[in-house]
Image (cartoon, rainbow, N blue to C red):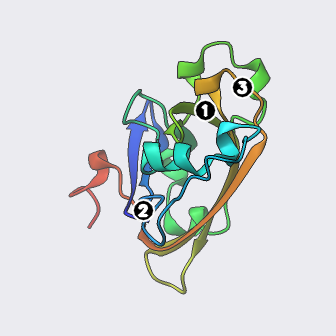
Amino acid sequence: MREFKWTARVVDGEVWFDIHLKSADYYSERDIEDDEDVDYESSWENPIVWGNYHRCTMSTHYWHKGGFRVCSLHEYSPEYLDGLELKIDMHPEQIEEWDDFAFHIYLLGHDAVACHTIKFIRESDSDNFSIQWQGCAALAYVVDYEFKHPFKLLVAKQKFPMPLCLIGAIK
């Protein structure tokens, strides 16, 4: 992973999280080679397509103002967050405007992600958390709106984010 940023903000007395993720280049561990003799069934299977798009960026705020609600401000603490599992955009077929998804993604073009399960696990008694995250992608750039490409991610040692309105207010 090249970049991971986890932040908190307060909206109408509720804490919302934003996450921004940028992967390593798709070809960072090995060269991506295209076999011109193979007729790939989809862009998902075609190695050269992956090479053309370089890396994945998934974000709640890079292209739009998304994010997801966590809890009320008075509940927010490392203890509250420890073990919390959130389900986000679990029924994408019910979302009419694609800008309303919590996350946007650039995977093999501007695609879509939904069906997120994000769990926060406190590391000992520290202010660090591991984040277990899974979801599904749809290759919207090729007009395939079925969320059939699962992903899983584990990110460790992420500092508990303090919403800006609380920085300096806690002693």
Q: Say left or right for 94 vs 125.
A: right
**Label whose residue precedes the other's in the sequence (1 or 2):** 2
Q: Which residue is drawn at 42% across and 67% down?
A: 28
Q: Say left or right for 18 vs 34.
A: left
Helix, strand or loop for disc 3: loop
Q: Residue at x 53, y 37 (%)?
A: 103
Q: Position of residue 88 (x, y in %)?
A: 67, 40
Q: Which of 31 and 114 is in front in this view?
A: 31
Q: Distance between the residues labelled 3 and 1?
A: 10 Å
Q: Which amino acid does label 2 sit on?
A: Ala
Residue 24: numbered disc: 2
Helix, strand or loop for disc 2: loop
Helix, strand or loop for disc 1: strand
How many labels were placed on the picture?
3
Q: Nearer the viewer, residue 157 or 24?
A: 24
The answer to whether residue 134 is above or below residue 29 is above
The answer to whether residue 96 is above or below residue 149 is above
